[in-house]
Image (tube, helix red, strand yellow):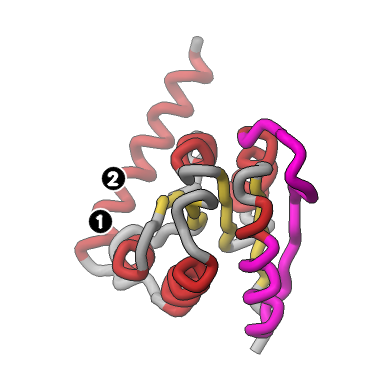
Amino acid sequence: MPVEKIIIGADHAGFSLKETIKTFLVNSGREVTDEGTFSLESVDYPDFGITVAKKVSSGEFLRGILICASGVGMTIVANKFPHVRAALCLDEEGARLSRLHNDANILALAGRRTEPETAKAIVDMWLKTAFEGGRHQARLDKIKKLEINLYRASAIK
């Protein structure tokens, strides 16, 4: 079985948790591409959210993880990209449902609100939960149709 590849990014508020999650992922046999940031020096979260979301949107990576102070900013940025379904998860149940029902392909975490052990449990749940499909696929198809229509409308202007 091929090694699962995950892309990860964070701002300064998510840096410490990113480092913890990166080690957790590598220790669980996954390959991690770290898009930064690489210190606690203040940076702008959109820069890292854009980089990760672009690579998930294009299909270069199937899944990504983004971390900022609250997780909200990264979620907003990531969801601007086609084919991205980013979910902010603060607990394991949210992570499970984001995969089971929404086929979330980017997990956003709150660096200042999530303890490292909790974050590892959230990531583990998110990675091991498969998309259920069925009635949920029909809902995702509606979102995909919306993305297409919005793209067409913006291209016309």
Q: Is residue 2 magenta?
A: no
Expressed as whole percent of the image width and height from the top left, the position of residue 66 reads: 57, 51
Is 68 on the left or on the right of 86, as rendered?
right
Q: Residues within 10 Å of mark 2 (few under 14, many from 20)?
A: few
Question: Which residue appears at 34% of the width and 36% of the height?
Answer: 146
Q: Nearer the viewer, residue 30 or 40?
A: 40
Count of marks, rendered view: 2
Three-letter amino acid code of the residue under disc 2: Lys
Expressed as whole percent of the image width and height from the top left, the position of residue 41 reads: 76, 39
Expressed as whole percent of the image width and height from the top left, the position of residue 6 reads: 65, 65
Q: Marks 1 and 2: CB-CB under 8 Å?
A: yes
Question: Which residue appears at 56% of the width and 45% of the height?
Answer: 68
> Helix, strand or loop at disc 2?
helix
Specify the farthest residue to the top: 157
Residue 138: mark: 1
Instruction: List the residue tagged with mark 2.
Output: 142
Is 119 on the left or on the right of 89, as rendered?
right
* Residue segment shown in magenta: 19-45
Expressed as whole percent of the image width and height from the top left, the position of residue 49 reads: 61, 41
Viewer can see residue 54 = no
Q: Nearer the viewer, residue 2 or 9?
A: 9
Question: Which residue appears at 41% of the width and 51% of the height?
Answer: 88
